[in-house]
Amino acid sequence: MIEVVPDIQFKKQLKQLSKAPLNECMQCGTCSVVCSLAPDEKPFPRKEMIWAGWGMKQKLMANTDVWLCHQCGDCSTYCPRGVKPSDVLAAVRQIAYIYYARPRFMGIMLSKPAWLPVALLIPVVIISLILTLAGTFTIPDGPVNYSHFFPHAWLNGSFSLITFIAYGLAFSGLLKFWNDLKRSYPDTKPDRGFIPSLFTLRKQIFTHTHFGNCSANKLRRWTHMLVFYGFILLLLVTAYAIYAAISHNYPLTLTNPFKLLGNIAAIMLIAGLGIMMVNRLINKEKTSSGNYADWLFLISMFLLTISGVVVELARFQNWTLAYHLYFFHLVCVWFVIIYLPYTKFGHLLYRSIAMSFAESIGRKINS
């Protein structure tokens, strides 16, 4: 016998985030039938819709299938009652970011519009404090050189330390997520660990194979590929820039191969993010218009990319406002990178963990 312990507040939160009429789900099973990814045994999202309708929070928080869903929208497109299962599962994932956030207030702060000013104020205050301690919180004279405004040692050291602390705190929440997944399958022992399972999934991750199985919104695979690889390229360029700064070979010239690679990455990100945002605005029937978490992620990533391009142009053109733009860019960097585990960007971590666990117990996504 399964004990049903409804969490009414959780159900209300799901309805608010997903805009889905949960009580109208008639359990016809269409969502699971049309999903090309759902495993044959206990397919999703039908059972998740039962749990959502009953407000069974604990069942959904520690559920691998919530993360195996790629939100392509097939189930919502064919749902005869318009209950929007894909949006419901997306809402569950958003609540999971808060539930597993360590410290919890970080997840809450980055999930509610009312807290956005605070989320912005934190990096502004801390970056200003670091610049004050470095003694460079003034506009330097002469040609634009961002290292005169924010010395590389202070920039790389402070941002690395803060990122390490944020991710270290978040790790305890991710570890709880992994342990909760194991507890949700008490009769199934994983036959391998996280790293070996993740390695097995390398093709799925790097080719976004499962996005191609969706019929309602096939464009999502290519837009995600653009953003995924654009972001990876930017990380590589950033790593090289740090090395160049340490070896006193910075700033990079416009013709430097890594500078060119960074500009290509920016184009990929702008194109991918732009298509995602437009698609959410004009193609609501096949894809969700997105909630606050979606738009916060998309806009912050877009601003990070655009501000990076503008800051680069400002340096070469010696704009008067170059340092002000650079400060804004640093806030964007903080918002995307340091806040990553607590925003929708955290799906990189949570989905990887859930997919690895599913692989370790032999729960395969159809392909």
Image (cartoon, rainbow, N blue to C red):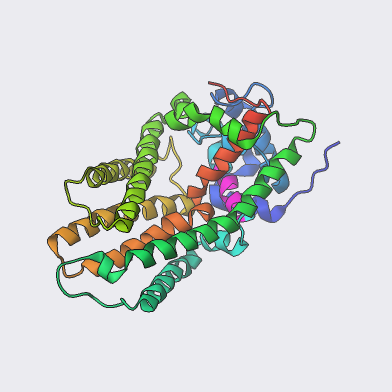
Q: Does residue 34 appear to the left or right of 277 in the view shown?
A: right
Asked if residue 43 shows in the view, the reply is yes
- Residue at the spot 38% in from the left edge and 42% down from the top edge: 232
* 76, 189: nearer the viewer: 189
Q: Which quadrant would the N terminus be assigned to in this image?
A: top right
Please give the name of the residue rendered at 24% of the width and 59% of the height, measured from the top-left corner.
Answer: 311
Q: Give yes or no for residue 309 being in the magenta stretch.
A: no
Instruction: Name the foreground residue: 219 vs 206.
Output: 206
- In the picture as drawn, the residue positioned furthest to the left comes out as 317
| Main secondary structure of the magenta stretch | helix
User: Which x, y percent locates residue 98?
Assistant: 60, 55
Identify the magenta region: 90-98
Q: Position of residue 123 (x, y in %)?
A: 43, 68
Q: Residue at x 57, y 61 (%)?
A: 108
Report x, y in % for residue 351.
55, 40
Residue 299 vertical placement versus 179 (above, below): below
